[in-house]
Amino acid sequence: MSSPAERYAAASRRTAQASQFPALDEFALDLGFDLDDFQRESCQALERGSGVLVCAPTGAGKTVVGEFAVHLALSGTPAQPAGADGADAAPARRKCFYTTPIKALSNQKYHDLVDRYGAEQVGLLTGDNAINGDAPVVVMTTEVLRNMLYAGSATLQGLAYVVMDEVHYLADRFRGGVWEEVIIHLPASVTLVSLSATVSNAEEFADWLVTVRGETTVVVSEHRPVPLWQHMLVGKRMFDLFHDADAARKHDVHPELLRYTRDTTRRLELGEGRSAGPGAGRRGPRWRGPLRPDIVDRLDREGLLPAILFIFSRAGCAAAVQQCLAAGLRLTSAEERTEIRRVVESRVTAIPGEDLTVLGYWEWLDGLERGLASHHAGMLPVFKEIVEELFVRGLVKAVFATETLALGINMPARCVVLERLVKYNGEAHVDLTPGEYTQLTGRAGRRGIDVEGHAVVVWSPETDPRHVAGLASTRTYPLRSSFRPSYNMAVNLVGTVGVEPARVLLESSFAQFQADRSVVGLARQVQRNTETIDAYGVEAGCHHGDFDEYFALRVAIADRERAVARQGQHQRKAAAVESLERLRVGDVIRVPSGRRAGLAVVLDPATGGFGEPRPLVLTQDRWAGRVGPGDFTTPAEVLARIRVPKHFNHRSPGARRDLAAEVSGTGLDRHAGRRGGRTRQGAGEDHAISQLRSELRRHPCHACPDREEHARWAERSRRLERDTEELRQRVAGRTGSLARTFDRIVALLTARGYLSADGTVTDAGRMLGRIWTEADLLVAECLRRGVWDGLSPSELAAAVSVVVFEARRDVDERASLPRGPVAEAVEETLKLWGEIEADEATRGLTVTREPDLGFAWPVYRWARGEALAKVLASGHELDGEMPAGDFVRWARQVVDLLGQLADSGGASTELRATARQAIAAVNRGVLAYHATA
């Protein structure tokens, strides 16, 4: 207990602080809890008039600093001049804009501020909603503020504070540049409050903020308000990752965990080694980790629910819920189940019953009522929102989620489980970074509810506990700028400040700031690599002859073999597509590979023209579903025909069983005969390869006994030379790189008539400046050429979809299109894209992404009023039907672009009217709910 003197000193300090920071003292009185040190330090800096960058872990309470900026704006300037008559004037009301990266966060923050300050004081501006936009406090997405700045909106008058929540989003590859645009273009009189996750280069970011915004105080806190305990689940045993806090700081893994995992790994290896006898050559016992239902049940028994279990796959999340249901898990009471059903039914009333069935509503509701749910981007937005609400209220106890949940709205848990430490990033399977691990596990521990949070990693033989310890203990999450000039940005900048000042503004971006700092380090690395390459060259030297020349022949052979293999693959795919298009109902075929390999009968040939053919089949194993060209390594061959009942219901287990028996009754062998040898042989008969091999054998170095050792050194040298050349290009391109890119963009826009020769913005340029999409120039060109004129509402929706849609994964074939006007408009769009791409390539610019036709059919059918089931089935997807969440998300983007066309001065009166009709046609059913949410 403190002495009277110490208590007196503490009281004196509080009194002094209250007199020095009266606004903070007033704000703190209404909070209901004591401010943490980092919160107090940040708020004090704000009250002194400094900008502030706050970096703190998830759930630490960063938003309190943003809310204090709101309080300062509403309470007026601390020192106002007296009125003309000598009486004190009332404090002037100033404005605060609170920006967030996603609409869901904006909606959540809007409701929080309304609860505190009242609806008349707070507004909301997102792509979907505009509520009280002239209020002194407005919550908005960052893009809305960017658009205001370029348009010179009158709403900016009186703006004193801008809060940028989740400012680390400026590293986002697709949208991050918007944050830098706002930071650079905000008037100097505006105080910026930047709230970020913990990043390792906070000081570098703060240095940049000082150069563009003036005085900025950086406050970094590593302290988690709720302690986080790390665990590993090995089979049925749970271990602490660290023995204590001191061991965690030193990355020292718990000895018992290390010993147990080593013993387990050794037993598995020995088990494989003893796999002899009749089964010799087969793999031995494989590691079978704990089942997902068992993990959830264990967490429930140990009082660790609610929990988020991260599974880096949409299909995996859905399968996990089904596994838990099949295991009979029930985590809710009767009262909770009643409340869950009430909440769900009240939220889905606007969705038609037939659509709910298509969306798997009843299975989803069954999971919710048992306290189980999945959460991923493929879900319908309203379904995700319901899961979030029920989880926050403690009604749903276990959520299986992809990593996108970690970037979403506030949804903390008591425990977080990571099933794997590898995820698919859209191109390849990659290890989690320490930053991603911290972000995911940061969800564990609810402030004010839990005494401690828990993170559990499920062990497998590929998981080294020491690697997990490194992830858990490292706070490496550097902020890297993704800023680059766009066509829209260029015309807006030139129109606002002129060409030369615009170039200076771009040079002040965080991207250029980081580029200039990194050149020195890159140059050093180039020098080191060059020395290493010289050393490799000595090792690769051969006394028989020129080994570089010999190795170049080997590389040429490998390149040609790959090219021939790709060519053969395309030919096989084309043959498979052609054979599938010829199938009829009742044809018995053999699926040669994949999970559905074996005999199958065609139920529906699916010749509707929605891209590549995907016939509906029933296998002899009673599985019914669609197969595509990817399932056929050879053309589909009709082996027999059987009669399929006219109204066959493939969803009926009995009907499937009877027809599958008929397929088996044909007596055909389910396995394919010997095939494929000729294809491999054909690659060897390629004339160019034969000629290269002949040259290789005649080369003197081919006879060298140390040939393969030389080749290993030559391969290392080649790889390092390739990496070094990339480094040289980066060094050459970084200094003044943004200004050079800007000059090229200005030259292209001038040549195309968006800017005049003297650097002023033309009418076409003003139209381009109001188009906010990744393919801004392509959209502008389509408008100028009248590509979309004369289309019906559904045709227009399909035609514009190709410039916004981007498939999750690359598909080799181009999707089909509705015949007639849509196909003609899209062909014209592709032609324009080709012209723009050629122009960009000539000038050394990053090319505009090629239009993607994969969403044209779904949005066309939806705008025509067709059923959701047919719409989702017409998506050009590798995995079958398009997920409902993806459909809604892309349809909303189509609506957003249609809205821009409806308001565009560059569009004809007829096109603007058609765009409005198209918006009305698309905003129905599941889209109508989302549009008003």
Image (cartoon, rainbow, N blue to C red):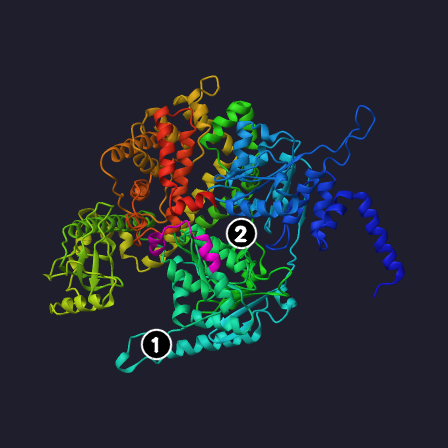
Q: Relative to residue 91, is residue 531 drawn left or right?
A: left
**Residue 773: in magenta span:** no
Label annotation for residue 284: 1
Query: Residue 670, image x and y in percent?
Result: 17, 67
Q: What is the quadrant of residue 279 in the picture? A: bottom left
Residue type, numbered disc 1: Gly
Residue at 77 percent across and 30 percent down: it is 89
**Label 2 sits on residue:** 409
Q: What is the quadrant of residue 474 in the picture? A: bottom right
Nearer to us in this view, 766 or 70: 70
Looking at the rendered structure, the secondary structure element under dot 2 is loop
Residue at 40 percent across and 76 percent down: it is 269
Specify the principal SS of the magenta part: helix
Q: Are marks 2 and 1 in contact (CB under 8 Å)?
A: no
Query: Residue 72, image x and y in percent?
Result: 70, 40
**Residue 349: in magenta span:** yes
Nearer to us in this view, 511 or 664: 664
Query: Residue 357, image x and y in percent?
Result: 34, 56
Point out the image quarter for the N terminus. Answer: bottom right
